[in-house]
Amino acid sequence: MALLTTLATIFVVSSFLTGNYVLRQSSEPDKESFSENRFGNSGMYYETPDLQNNELYEQSYVIDPLIGGGGGGGSTDDDIFVRNDSFRSAYFRNLKNNMPLNRLGICGYTGISMYISFFDTYWSDLFIDEKYESAPSTVSSGVISNTSPSQSPGVFNNITWNSPTMDTLRNSVLSQGYIEGTDAYKEALDRLVMQEIVDQIQQETFLGKLFSIALANGSINPHFDLAEYYQNPNGYLDGIGVNYDITNSVMHDYISQQPALANNVSIVTSQMSADTQSEKTRIRNEIVQLVKSGKPVLMGGNGFTDTNGNGVRDPSIGDEYEWGHVIVAYDYDEVTDTLYGNWGWSGQRVHESVDAYFNIRIHDYWCYEIGEGLSQTNTNHYRIGTSNQYLSPSGVILEQSTYQPDSFGFEPQYFFYEKNLSVSNGNYIVSTKRLRTGYIENSFVNLSPARENAGLAYLEIYSPTYINRFEFNASYWSANEYVDTSNFSALVQFKTANGNWITLIDLVRDVNLSKNRLDQDHFSFILSTNNVIAIRIYYTDLIPYGSSNKGRISIGELSILHDIEVLDA
Amino acid sequence: MNTNKKVIGIIIPAIAAVMMTACDTSISHNNVLLSFKYMSISSQSNETDLSFQDDPDYPDLIATFTVEQNHVISLEDLANIGSLTSFIPHNQGGYYVRTAYYSDYLNPLSGSQLAEGYECITDITFYYSFTGGPAQSPEKVNFSFILLDIIVDSDSEFGFSFIETNTAPIIGIEFDYGKDILQEDMVRIDDEISELLEIDSQSIFGYFPDPSQLSNELRLTIGTQCLYDQDYFFGILD
């Protein structure tokens, strides 16, 4: 239970004004730098912290009401991360369109996206920023199975079947009169490829996020920079493929750049140390062991199509060229010793034999290890019908309750004493406590601590069920509230069962809160703990004075994502 | 005078000794330069006939790695060298695997390879290349059509619902991967099924991917993209 109460709460602040997103942590986890420990000559590396605590997953597991077999997957006893394998199988069998469409040979990035989106759905919504996610998938009932829903949630994809392929780009350059092989041709192609990359970054897709990481660490190495050519010894960019080093650097840098993940997620990875059958077998065996432990594994390798059926690749036959691919392996049939994966091809080959396909080499793999600081929490990626309820893979049903400022029924006054009120939203009834907080001018819920004999304003909301996340719009009432950061503080806090109030953000000191109530900022808080019972805004003014109500912060629409199972009194 | 000569005699050897020490130090810290040159693969047949040649597009793609003499290559060294040589020439997208580092580019398998445990004695150039490339993409999608019995169901959006009687597809129709279903495709589906069952195509009620969830949103229709193999369920109205 101690593991479940570990707090590492993260929140996301998005500003309507700037469009910027800021990630912060309320409690600083133990700092442990990444390093590598060698395990003999196996070629397997574990990046610290050493987090192979399988007990964690068992303790964090709540209930698994999911149905559907694992396609002959490992036994229940073997499955640790996803206990009876049903969700993992259902997720990857139906992960079809919610990934970057592989039109430019971006299989590495598509594979990474598929891999991370599984953890974002199954383990914690902190793996992928909300702005990159696809819309929730719809389930008709309280189960997730191999056949329902038909699409798994993942990341939003903006690449269409009309988007260019590498052939399209090359033909485009040729059609402009460039001669293949010349520097002018390479420069023109380089620009077109980079334009595709820049488009993804500017459109703020998840693929764009991965591209920006690859650009920053040199994995994507364009010939030109800021439209000015320079002589790059590495030559011209003519594609966006990956190899072990590129995939490894993008996987690693993605984790290290996410504050919520950096100290809590490590990567188990290995690659063939020699192009031999024994090394291929070693890599495969390690992948199988990880899959049997209940985890999906990102992996890459090479193969060929044996067109003449002689069992070997004939380089002289054009159709038997060697290709490479990156997939997610997620299922293993012990009886037939078959490893299965999702190919990232928009629903084609969602459950395909890895061995039959990668007939040259299974070259490498990556697998997350999750530490104690990142508990499994409920996610809202599966919507139940058209209702406001969501089925978390953890088995918990969540409900979204939304409040407009007038929903609370507060008086249009700033009382100098605490007022209590129960507020119903369907069957969800919260109790509120407030001080110097009222519904003002039929427009916003205002908190005002700045007045003589005041100095404190708060709004506390107590939920009958656990709160998973909440979000609200906020601003100052006007540009003339006389708020200064030395005397004022407006803490957004949450409270766990039997716990103290824990601060997420200070609306006065941590952000430049909008001064225009018609253009409020939006705040969204994903709670990385499962037992939150209350939230509040606690607003203080150390030197209150004057006879008018000042320092006013206005709260607009507020919504709470909460369990539906009522807590014991 | 004699005294002076003695002092000089002591000082000179001392300077010589210092100079010799400095010289020795220089020798004991010799560095070895490992060079890694990208080449293209000129021939490859399984693992027995591999040779490299210069790639005119990348004549100077050479990375260098300096170690102390007699240094023994570790896995960490190999990881660092891997980063230095991770650029993929002639990258068409897809997934690539770097070959080993060979000392002999004409007949790589007969020379030495850089591996964990290699002792760096003299400057040397290793040659490497990449295999792999864009993976095959799927070309065809197969839609299978399954006939079910229909019952009147006032709760259903359509007034009907399916009874699962037989889940064997009666026909499969292939489409190009990624294409949008057009009106002519719908006509083709209706025609093939009605011809097979000897019915009027107007009496076909379907095609739904989930027999328990009859919804226009899910229905196979004009605009549906052919992205993956899919079963579609239908019935026949009297």
Image (cartoon, coloured by chain):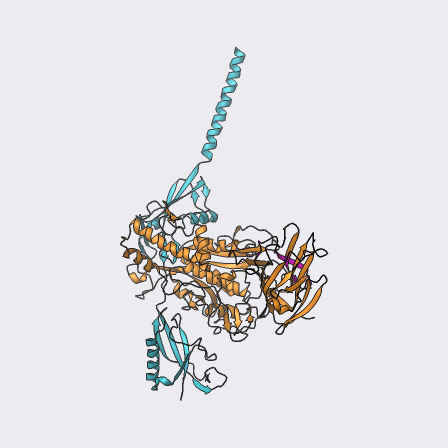
Chain colours: A orange, B cyan
Q: Residue A128, how many percent across, how many down?
A: 51, 60
For image coordinates 34% across by 64% down, the residue present is A305
For image coordinates 28% across by 59% down, the residue present is A316
Seen in the picture, residue B238 relative to A404 is either above or below; the reply is below
Q: Residue A417, how many percent across, how many down?
A: 72, 62
Name the image quarter holding residue A496: bottom right
Given residues A130 and B41, the one toward you in this image is A130
For image coordinates 69% across by 57% down, the residue present is A456
Name the image quarter holding residue A202: bottom left
Given residues A492 and A205, the one toward you in this image is A492
Residue lying farthest to the front in this orientation? A547
Seen in the picture, residue A218 relative to B226 is either above or below; the reply is above
Residue lying farthest to the bottom in this orientation? B238
- Residue A31 at least partly seen: yes
* Residue B55 placement, left or right of A405: left
Given residues B7 and A5, the one toward you in this image is A5
The N terminus of chain A is located in which quarter?
bottom right
Given residues A251 and B30, the one toward you in this image is A251
Q: Residue A537, how many percent across, how many down?
A: 64, 60
* Residue B149 placement, left or right of B198: right
- Residue A295 at least partly seen: no
The C terminus of chain A is located in which quarter?
bottom right
Q: Residue A485, how many percent across, how many down?
A: 63, 51
Residue A492 drawn in magenta: yes
Residue A496 drawn in magenta: yes
State which region is magenta. A491-520
- Magenta stretch: dominant secondary structure: loop
